[in-house]
Amino acid sequence: MAITLLPLPYAQDALEPAISAETIGFHYGKHHKGYVDKANAAIKGTPLDDANLNAVVKDAASSKDQKLFNAAAQAWNHGFYWHSLTPQSGKPGSALAAAIDASFGSFAAMTEKLLTEAEGHFGSGWAWLLADGDALSIATTHDAGCPLTGTARPLLVVDVWEHAYYLDRQNDRKAYLTAAAGLLNWNFADERFADPDFWVYPE
Ligand code: MN3
């Protein structure tokens, strides 16, 4: 079974005005789809042909197949990114809110750290809210870097590749990040925090 291009969890214009329908159209329909297509081409006829995308990412990392890793991890990261955003952002539930306070001091301090690290990340990559048990942290990864290769579990991610914002914001990454911070899907993060198997990568 091939890796699927997961459907967007909302309409293409649902994140406007923070992120335009045009940006989502290119980002999902060209960039994300391109990574899924490349990953599928790379695993076709190999023992990974029937594997879940999580397993493909981990296998490519451990076998140091950089070409497959880049395509597969980008397919995974983008699926996770779309679910990390929502027009109904909300607030973290009580369990996650307590972990945020314990790890960062406050929700505002966590948001500030996420924005600062994402804005300061050099070049293409991703900014993550991670959980290792109840201990939360912010981390960035370069290019296709994906936390599935580590021990901490991602709760949310923001794409900081230029293709995520250039049509809307040109080089103003900070404006994109500030807008994206208002779209973070705290209900999704709550579910991820409560259950490590929630949204592993849907078949
Ligand atoms: Mn992207």
Image (tube, rainbow, N blue to C red):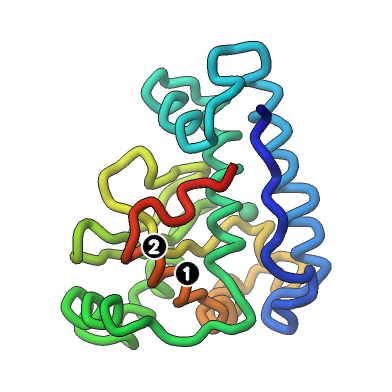
- Ligand 1 closer than 8 Å to label 2 CB: no
User: Measuring 19% from the left and 65% from the top, which residue is drawn there?
Assistant: 135
* Relative image position of residue 133 (x, y in whole percent): 20, 59
* Relative image position of residue 145 (x, y in whole percent): 45, 43
* Relative image position of residue 18 (x, y in whole percent): 67, 81
* Relative image position of residue 21 (x, y in whole percent): 80, 71
Q: Is residue 27 left or right of residue 195?
A: right
User: Measuring 32% from the left and 78% from the top, which residue is drawn there?
Assistant: 110
- In depth, the one of 2 and 40 nearer the eye is 2
- In depth, the one of 147 and 199 nearer the eye is 199
**Image quarter hosting the N terminus:** top right
- In depth, the one of 198 and 13 nearer the eye is 198
User: Measuring 38% from the left and 47% from the top, which residue is drawn there?
Assistant: 147
Q: Is residue 113 left or right of residue 66?
A: left
Q: Is residue 202 left or right of residue 6?
A: left
**Image quarter hosting the C terminus:** top right
Q: Secondary structure at mark 1?
A: helix
- CA distance for labels 2 and 1: 6 Å
Q: Secondary structure at mark 2?
A: helix
- Ligand 1 closer than 8 Å to label 1 CB: no
The residue wearing badge 1 is: 188
Is residue 190 depicted above or below 71 in this figure? below
Mark 1 Cα shell of 10 Å, populated few (<14), some (14-19), many (≥20):
many
What kind of residue is marked 2? Arg
Which labelled disc corresponds to residue 108?
none
Is residue 157 depicted above or below 51 in this figure? below
**Is the Cβ of the residue at disc 2 closer than 8 Å to that at disc 1?**
yes
- Locate ligand 1 by image quadrant: bottom right
User: Measuring 40% from the left and 61% from the top, which residue is drawn there?
Assistant: 128
The residue wearing badge 2 is: 192
Is residue 1 depicted above or below 16 in this figure? above
What kind of residue is marked 1? Phe
